[in-house]
Image (cartoon, grey):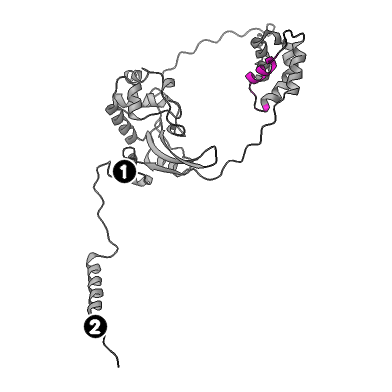
Amino acid sequence: MAEANSNADARPAHVHPKAKPGYGKRTAPDQARRTSNDFAHLPAREASIAAFIDRLPEGAAMDAKTLAAHIPDYGQAACRTALHRLTDEGHLRRVTERTRGDDGSNHWVTRTYFSRTPRDDDWWADFQAGNVPESRPRPEPSPEPRPEPRPEPPEQPESQPRAAGKPPRSQAYEGLALAGRMDPRMTLSARDCKTLEPLAEEWLARGASQEDIARELTAGLPPEVHHAASVARYRLQEKLPPERPAPEPAATGRVIRIMECMLCRAPGRPEALPGGFCRDCRSEPAPPVTYAIPPQEVRRRADAIRASIRTPERSTT
């Protein structure tokens, strides 16, 4: 299995192309943690391609053509067959989702959900319905070898306490210190950064970043700055950005998803797509047609209607 996984490492995942905005790979929820045995139940080729897909970022293109261009050992046909097998094993499903765009309008996008943990049809049906998938018992992976524990160093006597590590510096402190690295004229001492830290924290609370603070402190400086701390205090107070608007309440409507066949993309209910494929793509015969009324009864009623039409009405006197 190590050889199979090594094939997927031939091209790092971070250079993999993205799909169109809103499309591409999506990671299914409620997955087990990543281990070296996630795809041990698959053949070597499918395990290699599954390991590659597992490391792709959200929104990455994962069609057979794109995968073949980034996995040197396999062509489009092999990748297409592997995606078919991964669907059969419960790792893949294609879903059309309704999303809301920036302008407030609704859009339908096609996403391919990948689950490192294989799922059955019931789990995918729950997911398609927008329900939170319940945790189902799954086989535990074989334990990985653990390194031998290292002996702990002897404790120091109480008379010689360990040197305490330096406390981590806040983002506001780092933003102030960054200004001096961007322009030496705005170099602030440690005491200055600590004193001005509350003002910089207010900038961060209003959506600014460390780089925003440093750029504002270093922009348009005079040729000489005699007191960097005073300049920093003035700019932090006078150029404070406006407060961020309160976020709009999240929509309470459930996500609308329509599952599609992984081959022909025919939409259907989950029970009509067992294993992720429609009946035609599974090469299954059509179910026998059942009638609410037997054909003989239909013919009898039709004959009675025809006879009543042909019979002349009797004249009444």
| In the foreground, 62 or 279 | 62
Left or right of 251, for residue 223: right
The local crowd at label 1, few if under 14, some if 14 to 19, many if 20 or more residues have their Cα within 10 Å, is: many
Residue position for label 1: 278
SS label for mark 1: loop
- Residue 214 among those drawn in magenta: yes
Left or right of 303, for residue 118: right
Task: Relative to 206, say whether 300 is above or below.
Answer: below
Q: Position of residue 90 (x, y in %)?
A: 36, 35
In magenta, the rendered stretch is 205-220
Left or right of 168, for residue 262: left
Q: Position of residue 251 (x, y in %)?
A: 56, 43
Q: Residue at x 28, y 31 (%)?
A: 81
Kindly indicate the quadrant of the structure image that contains residue 13: top left
Residue position for label 2: 312
Task: Relative to 34, say whether 253 is above or below.
Answer: below
Q: Residue at x 23, y 74 (%)?
A: 306
Under mark 2, the amino acid is: Pro
Task: Relative to 55, say whether 28 is above or below.
Answer: below
